[in-house]
Amino acid sequence: MNRQITQAFASPTRWRWLFLLALCNLLLSGCYSMRIIESQVQTSTQWPVTASQSIAPAKAFFRLDRLPADVNNLQAGWAEVELEAALAPLGWTRNDTQAQYTIWIGVRAAEFIADPWGRPVRGPWVNRFNMSIGTGYRPHGVGWGLGMSTGMRAGFPPPSGYAQEVSIIIRDLQTSNVVYQTKALHEGPWSDHPNIWRPMISAALQGFPNPSVLNRRVDTTIAR
């Protein structure tokens, strides 16, 4: 009799555990398919100032500005397209003939050697220098010894990391003054730079045209 009762309760319990395991596996796979891009953003604004407040236009026309070295740079062209898409919902539209402002955008990336915690390191050698001086007994006198050693970091070569940067500068066409400047920085293991730059452009423009916090960290979740 007890065996029959145990079997009756065992089947629902087993299916319940199988369901929980499947749910945990689904949640974990969802977490592994996403990544968080941390952007360190620094913004400076110099909009024209009236007696009480600065005047930052909610809507404006702009044209793109490109350095001579970037005239045939495909990377610069990609960044400009992404910038237009990011500014359009904010009320800023590209219009080369009626532009009130010029906007320059620059993106770049660099590779660095990282330690196990992802922090940049200068080289494979550990900053270690050992020296020892001692005496030793001899049957016919005293001996001196001098030793030196250096060490190599365990697990060399260490993994690579990548630093990405997005810079945006806006100038007033009438005065040629810089009225808005923002920069976003990110360091991480990801080398697919366009996929990292895209959320960084949005992070750099967070709160545009007058962000409440000028120096801030912006986290963006994207797919792997």
Image (cartoon, grey):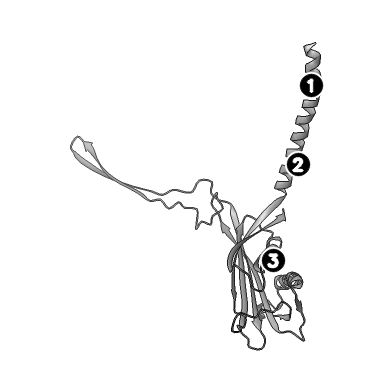
Q: Residue at x 20, y 40 (%)?
A: 142
Q: Amino acid at mark 3?
A: Ser
Local secondary structure at mark 2:
helix
Residue 65, can we see it? Answer: no
- In this picture, residue 84 sits left or right of residue 49: right
x and y percentages locating residue 128 in the rendered image: 40, 50
Q: How many marks?
A: 3
Q: Which residue is mark 1?
A: 9
| Extreme-front residue of the structure | 52
Task: Tell me which residue sits at (58%, 52%) in the image.
Answer: 159
Distance between the alpha carbons at the discs numbered 2 and 1: 26 Å
140 is higher (above) or lower (below) than 196: above
Residue at 68% of width from left, 53% of height from top?
35
Tell me residue 202's x, y (percent): 69, 66
**In the image, which disc is placed on residue 26?**
2
Q: Residues within 10 Å of mark 3 (few under 14, many from 20)?
A: many
Task: Give the residue pinned by disc 3.
Answer: 202
The image shows residue 137 at horizontal and vertical percentages of: 22, 36
- Residue type, label 2: Leu
Question: Which of the two residues, 33 or 219, is positioned nearer the viewer here?
Answer: 219
Which circle's residue, 3 or 2, is located before the other in the chain?
Answer: 2
- Residue type for callout 1: Phe
Mark found first going from the N terminus, 1 or 3: 1
- Few, some or many residues within 10 Å of mark 1 (<14, 14–19, 20+): few
Nearest to the observer: residue 62 or residue 149 = 62
Q: Gap in Å between the C-alphas at discs 1 and 3?
A: 54 Å
SS of the residue under disc 3: helix
